[in-house]
Image (tube, coloured by chain):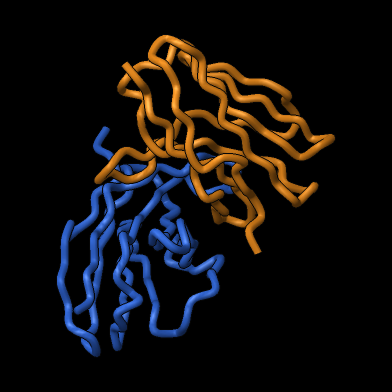
Chain colours: A orange, B blue
Amino acid sequence: GESVGLHLPTLSVQEGDNSIINCAYSNSASDYFIWYKQESGKGPQFIIDIRSNMDKRQGQRVTVLLNKTVKHLSLQIAATQPGDSAVYFCAENNDYKLSFGAGTTVTVRA
Amino acid sequence: KAGVTQTPRYLIKTRGQQVTLSCSPISGHRSVSWYQQTPGQGLQFLFEYFSETQRNKGNFPGRFSGRQFSNSRSEMNVSTLELGDSALYLCASSLGSSAYEQYFGPGTRLTVT
């Protein structure tokens, strides 16, 4: 079965607001996670990654939080823009392969 | 630095035929992975190659195969195509370890009729 899963398949956000996308994983031995963004007609684009020795990592307008106790990670997008509209995937990187969640479609309202 | 390139971008085949897809990784990347993306199953791992050796394989039938060349370029082949093989086939490259992020190409859209 699926080793990572997303909580919500869709998310509608007002432009300028913050977005939070959640993901749960089942393998407590998992130690490396990646968030990807996929726009229509394109391949997944690397956003940010986090390893199990960290709880938080920040990039440009994005923050990933990892809670190993409850096996949960989240992606926060600050000041969401129309260009952030896409499908977002969390993925577990292990044994030279990525295991993906089902994806959350983020729609930004003007 | 150029990204991952995949050829062809679009392909239409008939049931029973075979197809070969090609992937050129980012310069310096030695690991190439292949994924199948469909609306129903999402992104599914096919296989991963490093230095011409397959290190991991997903749960796909033997009709799906791949290989990697000495210059790290990779090909995947699907024989005896079925309607259900219609999908976006994505290639990703990385430096080589599970500890490194994978970067994806634009994919090859395969339609089987």
Residue A78 left/right relative to B93: right
> Residue A68, position in %: x, y?
79, 35
User: Relative to B4, is B18 above or below?
Assistant: below
Residue B80 left/right relative to B48: left
User: Relative to A102, is B89 above or below?
Assistant: below
Quarter where residue A72 is shown: top right
> Residue A108, position in %: x, y?
37, 23
Considering the image in quadrants, where does the C terminus of chain B appear? bottom left
Q: Nearer the viewer, residue A73 or B93?
A: A73
**Identity of the residue furthest to the right in this view:** A69
> Residue A20, position in %: x, y?
57, 24
Task: Name the residue at 47% across, 66% down.
Answer: B47
User: Relative to B41, is B31 above or below?
Assistant: above
User: Relative to B38, is B86 above or below?
Assistant: below
Task: Name the residue at 27% across, 32% down.
Answer: B1
Q: Nearer the viewer, residue A14 or A4?
A: A14
Residue A54 left/right relative to B31: right
Quarter where residue A6 is shown: top right
Q: Nearer the viewer, residue A13 or B48?
A: A13
Task: Name the residue at 74% across, 50% down.
Answer: A26
The image shows a total of numbered marks equal to 0
> Residue A9, position in %: x, y?
51, 43
